[in-house]
Image (cartoon, rainbow, N blue to C red):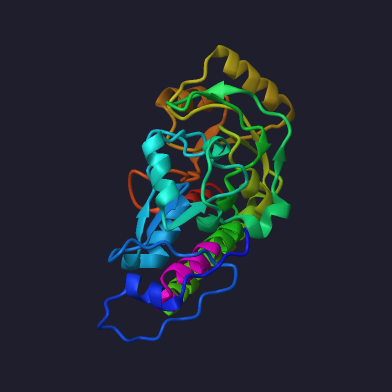
Amino acid sequence: MKNLLILPLLLLIAGCKPASESTPAAAPQPGAPAAAVPQGGKPQVYAANYPLKYFAERLGGAAVDVHFPAPADEDPAFWNPDDETIAKYQAASLILMNGASYSKWVDNTTLPDDKVINTSSAFSKDFIEVKEATTHSHGPEGEHSHSGTAFTTWMDLQQAILQAQEVSTALQAVVPAEAKTIQQRFEELKKELESLDNRLLGVSKRIGNTPLVASHPVYQYFARRYNLNLQSMHWEPETVPNNKDMENFVRLLSGHRAKWMLWEGTPAARSVDRLANLGIQSLVIDPCGNTPENGDFMTVMTANVEALEKAFP
């Protein structure tokens, strides 16, 4: 993230709070983005994925409008926004990117540097590089590969805290009159994430070196942080594995005798049955990259922790 200029403080106050309010504004933090606030309106914040949308909404509250336009049935990492949506990102007051090569569409467009926040920049030296990956196809986004940089960074909840901190810093610069409140909300969010992180560290000790299999290669940071002996397939929850898939799976099991399969979402009943015939139980650990059907980021992460605690009491 580049060092950026801050617009004059009085302009920020005029754009973000009524003239009748006289609460002194907090000083913007160094390196924060210049604000682009619609005249008489709220700053418009655009996020690259749902976790960042959640962080921005929770921290910014009613002081900002947060947008995450990816369709519910697509993986935001491989989603390609249309020209109109890209224009909205470009016109935003703040653009929250995940980093770690998450948004593939950014390679083919230009976003204003002074508005872009790379929320994973603080731990970029710790990115996991995926050297080998199978090209496969699922959902409207079509054929793609998970080679390159592993991108579900927030599944390591300590990294999620660092990403939320970047969001907090950026929001405080855009709405300095709310800086104290945003910081307080961040501290509350941090405590909740630390609590879940500690619970995951606890259950990981009980799991030990037990072999696990994931349906999809999206758990790299999760496995590293919580010391899981995990190998991945390229299966989708809604697709029942065919005979060739099962042959490959059995081949994997010959050297990695797992008894649990982690799924991104609720798997098809037939998939559960096929795995059960091999003595494999199914467990949903949702990365929550897109908007959940029920609840929010924290309820989904809590459900993930509870599922592991139940499986490994």
Look at the image and tell me in which quarter the N terminus lies.
bottom right
The magenta span reads 166-179
Residue 148's place in the image compared with 99, above or below, is above
In the picture, measured across the screen, residue 303 lies left or right of residue 63, that is: right
Q: Which of 83 and 29 is in front in this view?
A: 83
Residue 69 within the magenta-colored segment of the rendering: no
Residue 210's place in the image compared with 251, above or below, is below
- Percent position (x, y) of residue 293? 33, 43
Please identify the dominant SS of the magenta region.
Answer: helix
The residue at 49%/73% (across/down) is: 187
- Percent position (x, y) of residue 66? 37, 56
The residue at 72%/29% (across/down) is: 132
Q: Nearer the viewer, residue 106 or 114?
A: 114
Q: Nearer the viewer, residue 45 or 18?
A: 18
In the picture, measured across the screen, residue 175 lies left or right of residue 106, that is: left
Q: Can residue 125 be seen in this view?
A: yes
Q: Nearer the viewer, residue 230 or 28?
A: 28
- Percent position (x, y) of residue 236? 49, 28
In the picture, measured across the screen, residue 194 lies left or right of residue 79, that is: right
Residue 168 within the magenta-colored segment of the rendering: yes
Number of marks drawn: 0
Q: Is residue 181 visible?
A: no
- Percent position (x, y) of residue 174? 44, 67
